[in-house]
Amino acid sequence: MNMNLAHAKCMRVVGFRGNFTSWLARRQKLRCLSSVSSPLAGIRVVDLTRVLAGPFCSMLLGDLGAEVIKIERPGVGDETRHWGPPFINGESCYFLSVNRNKKSLAVNLKHPKGIEVVKKLVASSDVLLENYIPGKLEELGLGYDSLRETNPGLIYCSITGYGQTGPYSERGGYDLIAAGLGGLMNITGPQEGDPCKVGVAMTDLSTGLYAKGAILAALLHRMQTGEGQRIDTNLLSTQVSLLTHLATNYLMDGREAKRRGTQHESIVPYQAFKTADGYLIIGAGNDRAFQTLCKRICLSELAEDPQYKTNAQRVLNRDVLLPVLSKRLSEKKTSDWMEVLEGCGFPYGPINTMGQVFDDPQVKHNDLVQEIDHPTAGTMRVPGHAVQYSTISTKENFPSPLLGQHTADILTNLLGYTKSQVEELHRDKAIALP
């Protein structure tokens, strides 16, 4: 049986009410416009998120071809539009970094007519992504239970700080707070120093990745069953799950993780060493790699020392071993050690500045910088999609939108409002036009 017909039959059986049909029509129209394979073409995402975790998630969905419509507060927009410097011709680089491949719809959610606009949009969409404090959208009539009445196939994904229920559920959540509460900051920083934050918002970004994966899984589930889905992700759960082996060490053995700078809790040597002019990271993750390291840096006697024969012994004796390795590695420049270790069979590398990162030959080879023309900022140069596919393109991108840039187009061409109705919404301050 033709897969499209099979899926359509499945949707009718479970009462999908034709949303699959509208999706299929959108997808076929988009395929006619482009020869590039975009797996999410025809999928419409209503993005009610702000700042980082949600926008990062929706950007990745947009990279894969989804139509992402970003709902923004008139006159203000996403908070990150105002985060900086740097600003390029008034545009925040922070905002530009995670909002490509989206349309901006400026709607006032404090106005009943603004709420009605969003409801009409969601009725013809596949995914709603939001990061409001639990209960807030329900108060506005935009909760899952009310929206699924007109769109039972809706995938409704929430990103909160701590979850929908529980003692912290009504608190706002930021990456830094979740990183502290979830244990990451306690294990990050110098051994004898204070807890530190990670250089980028890894808890936010990881939650965005979790949410993206959950949405894709829900889309597959819907194609198989016709069912919509209520998805709950939160920063705290993400961070606790990312503790992985350190969490298991505690849960199984009661062992508290310690701050160790760049050192590893369970592998030695696996850290950054200071060189004559910078740093060198060495990841000798097994006994053979340690033996090779010792030979390459002319410390073969360490490889034969019984107290360093196995990784477990090296972990126990790290306080004796590491000063010896540190002294030796401080005697040459990083580039010299890179030559010495060439072809050694285990991972090693420098700690690069931002400039060195984007001048690195492998980074250039991987084509990780995307250039996209922006109407006011000029050429956007941003990190592109990190995954390469054999038949899927993630290179056909359009720039981060201006605030409310697509409001009139969405209202008239997508939702069927007349020009006079749009003008009335604007006069009533239910929407904003650029």
Image: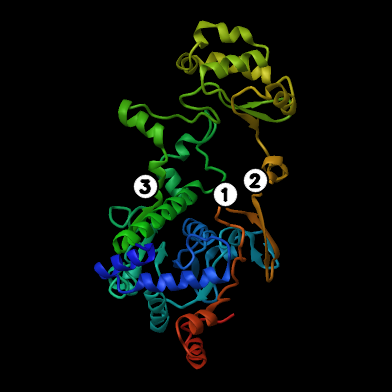
Q: Look at discs 3 and 1 and give the one toward the viewer.
A: 1
- Residue at the spot of label 3: 237
Q: At label 2, which amino acid type do we have? A: Asn
Q: Position of residue 380 (x, y in %)?
A: 68, 61
Q: Residues within 10 Å of mark 1 (few under 14, many from 20)?
A: few
Q: Nearer the viewer, residue 81 or 355?
A: 355
Q: Earlier in the sequence, mark 3 or mark 1?
A: 3
Residue density around tag 2, few if under 14, some if 14–19, many if 20 or more, within 10 Å: few
Q: Position of residue 199 (x, y in %)?
A: 57, 44
Q: Which residue is mark 1?
A: 388
Q: What residue would you read off at disc 2?
A: 366
**Which quadrant is home to the N terminus?**
bottom left
Query: Is residue 343 positioned above or below 159 on the image?
Result: above
Residue at image coords 42%, 70%: 24
- The answer to which of 332 and 340 lies nearer the viewer is 340
Q: Is residue 284 left or right of residue 312?
A: right
Q: Secondary structure at mark 1?
A: loop
Report whether residue 72 is seen. no
* Residue at horizontal 54 percent and vertical 16 percent from the top: 288
Q: What colouring method underlies this structural image? A: rainbow
Left or right of 359 on screen, residue 286: left
**The furthest residue to the bottom:** 420
Q: Secondary structure at mark 3?
A: helix
Q: Crowding near pointer 3: few (<14 within 10 Å), some, many (20+)? A: some
Amino acid at dot 1: Gln
Total residue callouts: 3
| CA–CA distance in space, label 3 to label 1 | 29 Å
**Can residue 222 be spotted in the picture?**
yes
Question: Could you tell me the amino acid type at mark 3?
Answer: Ser
For marks 2 and 3, the one nearer the N-term is 3
CB atoms of marks 1 and 2 within 8 Å: yes
